[in-house]
Image: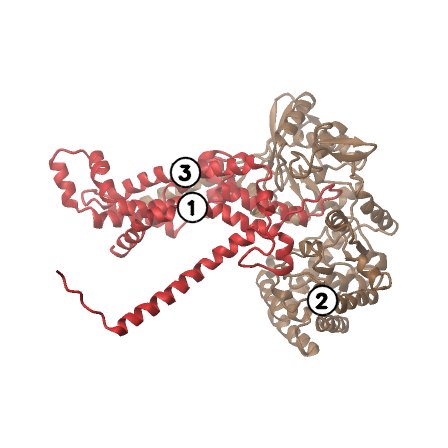
Chain colours: A brown, B red
C-alpha cells in the first residue's frame, strides 16, 4: 500500500513538472522587451538545405543587431513528419515559431490550445506586418474568434487540370481539349493508336476512397459544385456556399459512375488500377501514360514541361485547367501557409518580431528564400537564376521551405515560371476567395462511423469508381445501403452542424 | 579396414531427389536478391516501361550515381552507422551479459524481483510521448549522438535470453570452484563466464548489431543535424524528401529534381543490406546453436 502511494506521488510530481510551463511574455505594457539576448527556436517541415549553417549565420548577424537575438532553424524532415509535429507540440519543449497549414491540422491544434493568441502580440511586436497582411486574411485564419497564425499573402492557385501529350493530339488531328467530350476523344485516340501507352494513369486509393476521377466529376461535369466533393458524399454549391447536397446515390452520381464504367471498358485505365502503386508522374514523364488527371496543378504541369522538354524534346505537354471551363477558382486559403507561436515559446514577442523581419525586410527575405546572392543565385533582370546545378547546390530556390514568409514584392522567379504565371493571370480574372479550406471538421464525435464508412468506400465505392462493377445501378444501391448501415447519415448531420457553425462564425451566407 | 555399409538403391534415389529439390528451393531463395541487384542496375525508364527483370534489361548506374552524387553525406552516414554498431554492440553485449549473469546466480538475493522488473517493461510502456519527453526534456539528448546508442543498449528480451543461456551453459559449480580458488566476481565474469558463453554472445551480438544497423527511428525522432544521421535514416529520408518535393507544389521551383525512384529504391536496399549480410557467415555457426539453447531451455 505504502509503495503504491509513493509511486503515485512520484507520478504526480512528474506530471506537474511536465505541465508547469507557465506563461512567459516579453510583450508587456504595450512594448517589446529587447533587453535580454535570446535564442529563438524555429521549426519547419521538410529537410534542411545543405547550406543552412551559412544562411543561419547571416541571419543571426542581422538579427543580433536588429532584435538582440539569434535563431536556430530546425527541420522535421519529411520522414514521419506528422508524428514529429505532434510530439513537438505535446512535449512542451521550447519552440518559438512553427509552420502551420490546414494540412498540418492548424485548426485542430489551435482549438486544443497549442498556440498562443496573436492579436495582442502582433500589433506591438510587428506593427508593419500587422498592416501588411490584409484584414480579411487575419479574419480567415481565426479559430474560435482568435488569431493563432500569421498568414502568408502570396496568391497562388492549386487547382487541377487535364495534362496530356499535345504532340499526340496534333498527330491524330484531334480537336483542342476544352471539355469532357474532347477529353474522351483524346483518350479514345490513345487507346486505339498507342498500344504501348495507357491512356490515363493514376493509382491507389486515397484516405477517403478511390478519388482518381473526382476532380473531373467535380469540376467539369458539375460546374455548379465546388471542390468539396469528398466530404462523406456531400457536395457544396459554389453559388450558395452554406448549402450542401447529397451527391452519393443521386442521379448525377449514377450517371458519372456509368461514364467511368464506359471509360474502364474502353481501356482508358488499367484493370488493376485499384492496387497500382505506380508513380503517375514518373510514368507520364517516361512516356507510358497518355494523360494525367488528379493533382495536376499549374506548377506541376510546368515541372513536367521542363523535365520532358529536356529528356524528350520532340514531345509536347498540353494542359487544360478545369477552371477554364467552370470559371470557378480560388487562391489558396490564408491558412495554407502560416507561422504560429506555440504555448511553449519563451519569447513570443521576439519571435513575432523576427518573423516580421523575414517577411518585410528585403535582406532577410531574399537571404532566406534564395540564399546568398552571388553564391547560390543571381538576380538576372528580375529573374531568379540558380548558380551551379540542382544536384549539388547547397541552397536551391525556397529550399528552406520558406513558403510562409514569401513576400510578393520581393519574389524572384525562374523564367520557366512565366508559364505558370500566365495561367495564374488568367485565373485572376475570375477568382474568388476560398470559403471552404478554413473549415476543419472535428471528427471525434463520429470517429467510429467514419472508420466504418471508409471501409465501405474502399469495398463498394472504389470498384464502382474504377468501373469494375458490371451492374452499376445495383452496385450503387448496395453501396448506399452499406454506407447508411455504417452511419453515413449520422456523420453527415454532425458534419453539417459543424459546417453551419463555421459559416456563422465566418459570416458565410 | 572398415567395411562400407551399402546403401539400398531406394535411399540413394531419395537422396538425389532431395538434393535436387533443395537445390532448386535454395536457388529460388536467391532470386529475390538477384532481382533487387539487377533492378538497381537497370535504367529507371526501362523499369517503368517493362517492369523488373532477372538480368538488367538496360544497364544503367544512374541509381548509384544519384545516391553517390555528393558522396560526402552518404559516407558520413555510413561512418555514423558503423560507429554506432560497433560501439553499441560491444558495450551492449558486455552489459547484457553482465546483467544476465548476475540475474541467474542463485546467490543473488533479489534476482527474481529484478528479473520481474525488467520483464515488466516488455508488458507496460509509457508510450511514445512520455518517452519522447523523457529523452528531450529530462535527459536533454536531442541532436546528441548518444541518443543513437543509449536507448538500444539494453533490451529486456535479450537480457532474458542471455540469462537463460548462461544458466544452461555455465554450471554454477564452476563458479563456486572459482570462488574457492580465490577469484573475485569480476575475474569470474571476464575469465570464465564470457569465455564459456561465446555462442550466446555471438547470437545476442548479432541481434544487437542488426538492431543498430537497421535503426532509423532514433535518428528520425531526435537528430536534426544531417551529419549525424544514421545510414538507414539518411537513405530513407532522401527518398521521402524527393517524393515530398514532387508532391508539394513548389511554386516557382526552377529545377525539379529528377529521381530514378524505382531503381534508387533497390540500390538503397543493396547499399543498406550489403555489409551486414557479410556478418552472417562469421557468426552463423554459433547463431543456430545459441538461439536454440538459450531460448528452448528456460
Q: Residue furthest front?
A: B1
Looking at the rendered structure, which numbered label has been put on residue B150?
Answer: 3
User: Can residue B134 be seen here?
Assistant: yes
Q: Position of residue B271 (x, y in %)?
A: 50, 45
Q: Is residue A387 left or right of residue B89?
A: right
Query: Residue A380, image x and y in percent?
Result: 81, 32
Residue appearing at x 58%, y 63% in the figure: A451
B191 sits to left or right of A190: left
Give the residue furthest to the right: A429
* Above/below status of B44 relative to A387: below
Q: Quadrant of residue A401?
A: top right
- Disc number lying in front (3 or 1): 1
| Nearest to N terminus: mark 3 or mark 1 | 3
Residue at which label 2 appears: A195
Q: Mark 1: give few (<14), some (14-19) or many (20+) Cα within 10 Å.
A: some
Q: Say which chain tag 2 marks.
A: A
Q: Which residue is mark 1?
A: B276
Residue A236 appearing in the image: no
What secondary structure is marked by label 1? Answer: helix
Amino acid at each position: 500500500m505504502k509503495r503504491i502511494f509513493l509511486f503515485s506521488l512520484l507520478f504526480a510530481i512528474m506530471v506537474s513538472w511536465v505541465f508547469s510551463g507557465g506563461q512567459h511574455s516579453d510583450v508587456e505594457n504595450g512594448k517589446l522587451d529587447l533587453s535580454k539576448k535570446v535564442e529563438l527556436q524555429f521549426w519547419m517541415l521538410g529537410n534542411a538545405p545543405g547550406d543552412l549553417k551559412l544562411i543561419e549565420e547571416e541571419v543571426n548577424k542581422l538579427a543580433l543587431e536588429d532584435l538582440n537575438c539569434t535563431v536556430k532553424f530546425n527541420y522535421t524532415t519529411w520522414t514521419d513528419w506528422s508524428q514529429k509535429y505532434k510530439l513537438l507540440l505535446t512535449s512542451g519543449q521550447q519552440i518559438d515559431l512553427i509552420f502551420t497549414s490546414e494540412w498540418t491540422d492548424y485548426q485542430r491544434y489551435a482549438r486544443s490550445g497549442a498556440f498562443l493568441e496573436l492579436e495582442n502580440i502582433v500589433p506591438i511586436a510587428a506593427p508593419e506586418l500587422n498592416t501588411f497582411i490584409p484584414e480579411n486574411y487575419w479574419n480567415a485564419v481565426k479559430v474560435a474568434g482568435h488569431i493563432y497564425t500569421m498568414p502568408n499573402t502570396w496568391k497562388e492557385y492549386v487547382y487541377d487540370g487535364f495534362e496530356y501529350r499535345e504532340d499526340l493530339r496534333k498527330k491524330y488531328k484531334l480537336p483542342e481539349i476544352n471539355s469532357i467530350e474532347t477529353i474522351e476523344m483524346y483518350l479514345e485516340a490513345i487507346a486505339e493508336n498507342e498500344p504501348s501507352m495507357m491512356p490515363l494513369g493514376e493509382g491507389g486509393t486515397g484516405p477517403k476512397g478511390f478519388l482518381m476521377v473526382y476532380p473531373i466529376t467535380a469540376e467539369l461535369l458539375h460546374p455548379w459544385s465546388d471542390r468539396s466533393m469528398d466530404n462523406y458524399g456531400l457536395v457544396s454549391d459554389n453559388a450558395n456556399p452554406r448549402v450542401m447536397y447529397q451527391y452519393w446515390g443521386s442521379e448525377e452520381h449514377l450517371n458519372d459512375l456509368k461514364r467511368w464504367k464506359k471509360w474502364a471498358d474502353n481501356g482508358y485505365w488499367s484493370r488493376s488500377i485499384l492496387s497500382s502503386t505506380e508513380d503517375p508522374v514518373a510514368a507520364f514523364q517516361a512516356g507510358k501514360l497518355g494523360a494525367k488527371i488528379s493533382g495536376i496543378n499549374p506548377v506541376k504541369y510546368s515541372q513536367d514541361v521542363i523535365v520532358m522538354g529536356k529528356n524528350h524534346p520532340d514531345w509536347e505537354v498540353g494542359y487544360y485547367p478545369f477552371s477554364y471551363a467552370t470559371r470557378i477558382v480560388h487562391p489558396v486559403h490564408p491558412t495554407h501557409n502560416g507561422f504560429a507561436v506555440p504555448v511553449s515559446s519563451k519569447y513570443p514577442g521576439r519571435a513575432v518580431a523576427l518573423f516580421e523581419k523575414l517577411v518585410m525586410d528585403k535582406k532577410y527575405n531574399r537571404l532566406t528564400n534564395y540564399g546568398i546572392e552571388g553564391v547560390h543565385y543571381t538576380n538576372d533582370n528580375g529573374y531568379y537564376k540558380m548558380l551551379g546545378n540542382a544536384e549539388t547546390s547547397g541552397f536551391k530556390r525556397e529550399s528552406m521551405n520558406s513558403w510562409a514568409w514569401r513576400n510578393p514584392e520581393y519574389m524572384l522567379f525562374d523564367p520557366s515560371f512565366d508559364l505558370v504565371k500566365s495561367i495564374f493571370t488568367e485565373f485572376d480574372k475570375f477568382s474568388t476567395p476560398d470559403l471552404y479550406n478554413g473549415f476543419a471538421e472535428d471528427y471525434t464525435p463520429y470517429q467510429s462511423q467514419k472508420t466504418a464508412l471508409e471501409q465501405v468506400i474502399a469495398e463498394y465505392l472504389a470498384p464502382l469508381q474504377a468501373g469494375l462493377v458490371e451492374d452499376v445501378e445495383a452496385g450503387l444501391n448496395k453501396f448506399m445501403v452499406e454506407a447508411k448501415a455504417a452511419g453515413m447519415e449520422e456523420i453527415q448531420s454532425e458534419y453539417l452542424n459543424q459546417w453551419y457553425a463555421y459559416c456563422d462564425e465566418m459570416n458565410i451566407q | 579396414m572398415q567395411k562400407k555399409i551399402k546403401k539400398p538403391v531406394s535411399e540413394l534415389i531419395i537422396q538425389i531427389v532431395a538434393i535436387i529439390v533443395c537445390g532448386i528451393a535454395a536457388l529460388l531463395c536467391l532470386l529475390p536478391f538477384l532481382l533487387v541487384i539487377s533492378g538497381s542496375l537497370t535504367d529507371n525508364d526501362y523499369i517503368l516501361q517493362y517492369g523488373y527483370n532477372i538480368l538488367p534489361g538496360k544497364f544503367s548506374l544512374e541509381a548509384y550515381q544519384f545516391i553517390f552524387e555528393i558522396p560526402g553525406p552518404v559516407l558520413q552516414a555510413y561512418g555514423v552507422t558503423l560507429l554506432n554498431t560497433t560501439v553499441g554492440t560491444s558495450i551492449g553485449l558486455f552489459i547484457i551479459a553482465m546483467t544476465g549473469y548476475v540475474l541467474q546466480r542463485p546467490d543473488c538475493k533479489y534476482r527474481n524481483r529484478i528479473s520481474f522488473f525488467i520483464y515488466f517493461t516488455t508488458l507496460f510502456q509509457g508510450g511514445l510521448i512520455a518517452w519522447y519527453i523523457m529523452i528531450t526534456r529530462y535527459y536533454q539528448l536531442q541532436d546528441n549522438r548518444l541518443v543513437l546508442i543509449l536507448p538500444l543498449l539494453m533490451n529486456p528480451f535479450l537480457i532474458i535470453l542471455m540469462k537463460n543461456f548462461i544458466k544452461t551453459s555455465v554450471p554454477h559449480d564452476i563458479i563456486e570452484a572459482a570462488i574457492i580458488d580465490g577469484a573475485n566476481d569480476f575475474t569470474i565474469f571476464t575469465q570464465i563466464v564470457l569465455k564459456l558463453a561465446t555462442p550466446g554472445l555471438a547470437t545476442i551480438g548479432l541481434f544487437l548489431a542488426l538492431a543498430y544497423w537497421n535503426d532509423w527511428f532514433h535518428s528520425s525522432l531526435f537528430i536534426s543535424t544531417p551529419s549525424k544521421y544514421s545510414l538507414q535514416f539518411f537513405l530513407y529520408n532522401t527518398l521521402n524528401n524527393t517524393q515530398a518535393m514532387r508532391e508539394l507544389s513548389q511554386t516557382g521551383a526552377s529545377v525539379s529534381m529528377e529521381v530514378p525512384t524505382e531503381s534508387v529504391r533497390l540500390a538503397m536496399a543493396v547499399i543498406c543490406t550489403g555489409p551486414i549480410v557479410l556478418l552472417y557467415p562469421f557468426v552463423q555457426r554459433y547463431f543456430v546453436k545459441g538461439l536454440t539453447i538459450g531460448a528452448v531451455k528456460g
